[in-house]
Amino acid sequence: MWVGKRTKTKSKKIGVLKRKYLKALNIKNCNCFNIYLNPGAEKHIKTKHPKVYNNHFNSIKYIIQRPDYLGLNPNIKDGIELVRDYKKDAVLISIAINKNGYLYLSSMYIIGNHKIQKRLKSGRLIPTP
């Protein structure tokens, strides 16, 4: 049994979501435009999505500032999806709004072009305004 002391880890700011993106998605319960990353989410990406972590993790700020597509995740209340379509890979960043109205990156993974096209056709994703 582990009896060590728990240390509180701090989330770090990783980018700023443009107001026009929230407006395009009709999200009103956001108190801050800063996007934060907690250590647990970074660990999740590193272990579950190592390819995207190794190839694109350092590009998070760029992807947040210049996504090609954005949308809402129907499985998460006010869950935001940002997609940057690189020639080799398309990267999806999932952002959640916590109960206090703050934005947190929850996951990041590679998404196939067929899924992008399907989500565009259904309206789940839209081209960035």
Image (cartoon, helix red, strand yellow):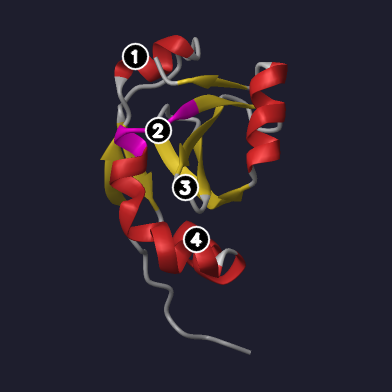
Q: Amino acid at mark 2?
A: Pro
- Name the front one of labels 3 and 2: 3
Examine the rendering and report whether any part of residue 60 can be seen.
yes
Residue designated by label 1: 20
In the picture as drawn, the residue positioned furthest to the bottom comes out as 1
Residue designated by label 3: 87
Q: Position of residue 65 (x, y in %)?
A: 30, 34
Q: Earlier in the sequence, mark 3 or mark 2?
A: 2
Q: Nearer the viewer, residue 92 or 113?
A: 113
Q: Quadrant of the C terminus?
A: top left
Q: Quadrant of the N terminus?
A: bottom right
Q: Give the answer, above or below, for where 15 lies relative to 122.
A: below
- Name the front one of labels 4 and 3: 3
How far apart are the alpha carbons under marks 4 and 3?
Answer: 14 Å
Q: Earlier in the sequence, mark 1 or mark 3?
A: 1
Q: Amino acid at mark 1?
A: Lys
Q: Position of residue 89 (x, y in %)?
A: 52, 52
Q: Could you tell me which residue is drawn at 43 percent across and 20 percent down?
A: 128
Dividing the picture into quadrants, the one containing residue 56 is bottom left
Looking at the image, residue 108 sits to the left or right of residue 7; the answer is right
Q: Kindly indicate whether the residue at mark 1 contacts the one at mark 2 (C-beta within 8 angstroms).
A: no
Examine the rendering and report whether any part of residue 74 can be seen.
no
Q: Could you tell me which residue is drawn at 53 percent across and 86 percent down?
A: 3
Helix, strand, or loop for circle 3? loop
Helix, strand, or loop for circle 2? loop
